[in-house]
Amino acid sequence: MLTILAGQAAIAIENATLFDKVRVEKSRLSRLVKKVLQAQEEERSRVSDELHDTVVQWIVSASYHSQTAKALIARGKFADATLELEEANRIIDQSIREIRRIIINLRPNLLSELGLLEALQYHLRSMEKETGVICHFIVQGKPYPLNWPQEITIYRIVLEALNNIKKHSQAKEMELAIWFTPEAVRASVIDNGIGFDPAKVAHSAHENGNIGLLSMQQRANLIDGELEIESSPGAGTKITLIIPTTKKRESKHKNGVTSLVRDKKGGEL
């Protein structure tokens, strides 16, 4: 009788343990799904903001120049009308290039066709040609295959960093460095631009919905990565993504601390 009771107790304990494991995994999966959905919404918001801040305003400007040209033609000022039409055409060409860039970023065919390193090199060459910013690309260590979530995370975060340099940094020179080690892959984007106060930017992002940096941190979190943002006014910016590539995880990843924002003095904010 005691043996039977002991066996039943052991089964009950085992079932309770299994139930607890299932509950924990279900909770973890639920949190992951929420993160993915949040990342999707933030990506949609980012694209919407990009279109509104650039293409939409440019098209409005082109329309204004076209209407001005029409009025000038009606008044017989053909030379002035020609200048207005040339400006409208220039803005339209600029809009087309921007739309193509956004489409490439949404559907990373380059990444699939060329691989991570060559795709990033392509974007650096394009940025140098488009903006005049001197771009350096450094690869250290022996490159090894990464899984798709790791590759797409590096790709997206680097492109977002490049976009920030073009729009906000006023940099003359930048560097993309990627290190391959047995434990992790690290990607750093460094510029010599005007820099910013990370604490103020993080606060304004929450207040105003400017989700560029927040989106980068969310992407890093989804694959147990770590994102470090170092900047201060007048001192440029350094954004570093660290992705563990082994099964070993530091305790801070287990505790959910996967992103740091620092000022140039090294203090956590």
Image (spheres, rainbow, N blue to C red):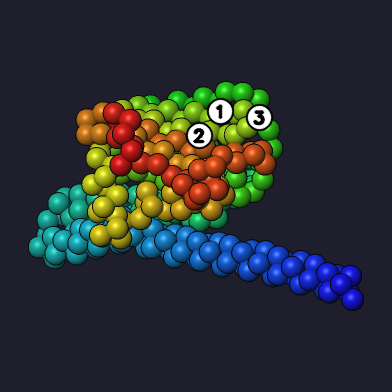
Assign a secondary structure to mark 1: strand
Which picture quadrant has residue 41?
A: bottom left
Query: How packed is label 1: few (under 14 Cα within 10 Å), some, or many (20 or more)?
Result: some
Q: Please state which amino acid type lies under the numbered disc 3.
A: Pro
Q: Which quarter of the rendering shows the C terminus?
A: top left
Near-viewer residue (95 or 181): 181
Q: Position of residue 233 (x, y in %)?
A: 22, 34
Near-viewer residue (232 or 195): 232
Pointer 2 and pointer 3: residues touching (CB < 8 Å)? no
**Residue drawn at the location 50% of the way across and 43% of the way down:** 252
Q: Does the image show residue 121?
A: no
Q: Is residue 27 left or right of residue 201?
A: right
**Residue drawn at the location 42% of the way across and 53% of the way down:** 215
Q: Please state which amino acid type lies under the numbered disc 1.
A: Trp
Label 2 belongs to which residue? Answer: 187
Label 3 belongs to which residue? Answer: 182
Please tell me whether residue 138 is drawn above or below residue 61 in the rendered image.
Answer: above
**Residue drawn at the location 66% of the way across and 67% of the way down:** 20
**CA separation in Å, label 1 and label 2:** 7 Å
Label 1 belongs to which residue? Answer: 179
Please tell me whether residue 3 is drawn above or below residue 207 in the rendered image.
Answer: below
Q: Is residue 164 left or right of residue 227?
A: left
Q: Which quarter of the rendering shows the N terminus?
A: bottom right
Q: Position of residue 24 (x, y in %)?
A: 61, 64
